[in-house]
Image: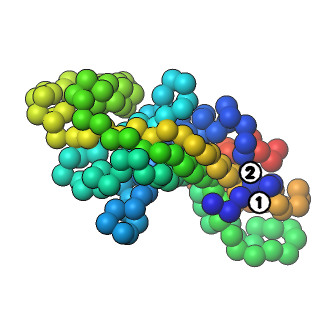
């Protein structure tokens, strides 16, 4: 990912906080000599050295992952930025937050390890529901999925939030995005710019 210095995020706590808030990503790898992507929820190991996820056994993407270096991308809030919102000259652009993680893949089929991933994801996303789902047919379910662990080798994090614009342009951009209802992006920009 192209990351000019004024958009670069290198603070580890900020990167993992962003990842926790935007943990649905795209696993990208080579499969049969073409790029392949699977859209998945990811977990981060407690020591922050690994990403974990699972794929349906019927998804052939997993069959080429073992020991391959892969790319996992995560996206935060984003929106179009009109130059009509600037007080100074400019061009149309897009503001966004993104994280790319490169790492080496390991595929596994051990039911207890897969169950741990499924349980952790279920607890996280079911916790706010009135009637949380209770797993049924657990053995059959676990046999239908493949576990994936990615050892994190490189983090590239970019917050392109108008930091390159003059300060007099910042409030106009934020005000217009707020009017459009782009609340998450407005919050991110306020945290960086104001």
Label of residue 4 in the image: 1
Name the secondary structure under disc 2: strand
Residue 110 found in image quarter: top left
Q: Which residue is drawn at the image coordinates 80% and 47% (left, top)? A: 193
Q: Residue at x 22, y 40 (%)?
A: 145
Compared with residue 12, is residue 123 higher up or lower down, i.e. above or below?
above
Label placed on residue 8: 2
Report, in whole angstroms, how far the alpha carbon at label 2 lies from the one at label 1: 6 Å
The answer to whether the residues at label 2 and label 1 have Cβ atoms under 8 Å apart is yes
Q: Pinpoint residue 11: horizontal percent, then vertical percent.
A: 73, 37
Q: Position of residue 43 (x, y in %)?
A: 44, 34
Q: Residue furthest front?
A: 67
Residue 91, by quadrant, is bottom right
The crowd level at tag 2 (other Cα within 10 Å; few <14, some 14-19, many 20+) is some
Q: Quadrant of residue 6?
A: bottom right
Q: Quadrant of the C terminus?
A: top right
The N terminus: image quadrant: bottom right
Residue at 82% across / 60% down in the picture?
A: 164
Does residue 132 appear left or right of residue 150 in this picture?
left
Give the image location of residue 83, x and y in percent.
75, 72
Q: Can residue 134 be spotted in the picture?
A: yes
Provide residue 99's location: percent of width, then percent of height.
59, 49
Residue placed at 45% from the left, 41% from the top? Answer: 150
């Amino acid at each position: 990912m192209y990351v000019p210095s004024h958009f670069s995020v290198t603070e580890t706590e900020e990167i993992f906080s962003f990842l926790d808030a935007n943990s649905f990503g795209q696993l990208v790898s080579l499969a049969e000599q073409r790029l392949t992507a699977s859209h998945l929820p990811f977990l981060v190991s407690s020591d922050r050295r690994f990403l974990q996820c699972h794929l349906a056994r019927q998804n052939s993407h997993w069959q080429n992952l073992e020991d391959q270096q892969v790319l996992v991308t995560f996206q935060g809030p984003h929106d179009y930025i009109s130059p009509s919102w600037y007080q100074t000259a400019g061009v149309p652009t897009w503001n966004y937050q993104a994280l790319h993680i490169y790492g080496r893949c390991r595929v596994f089929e051990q039911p207890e390890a897969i169950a741990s991933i499924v349980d952790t994801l279920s607890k996280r996303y079911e916790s706010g529901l009135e009637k949380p789902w209770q797993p049924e047919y657990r053995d059959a379910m676990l046999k239908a999925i493949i576990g994936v662990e990615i050892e994190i080798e490189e983090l590239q994090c970019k917050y392109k939030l108008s930091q390159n614009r003059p300060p007099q342009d910042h409030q106009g951009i934020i005000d217009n995005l707020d009017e459009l209802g782009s609340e998450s992006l407005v919050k991110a920009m306020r945290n960086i710019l104001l």
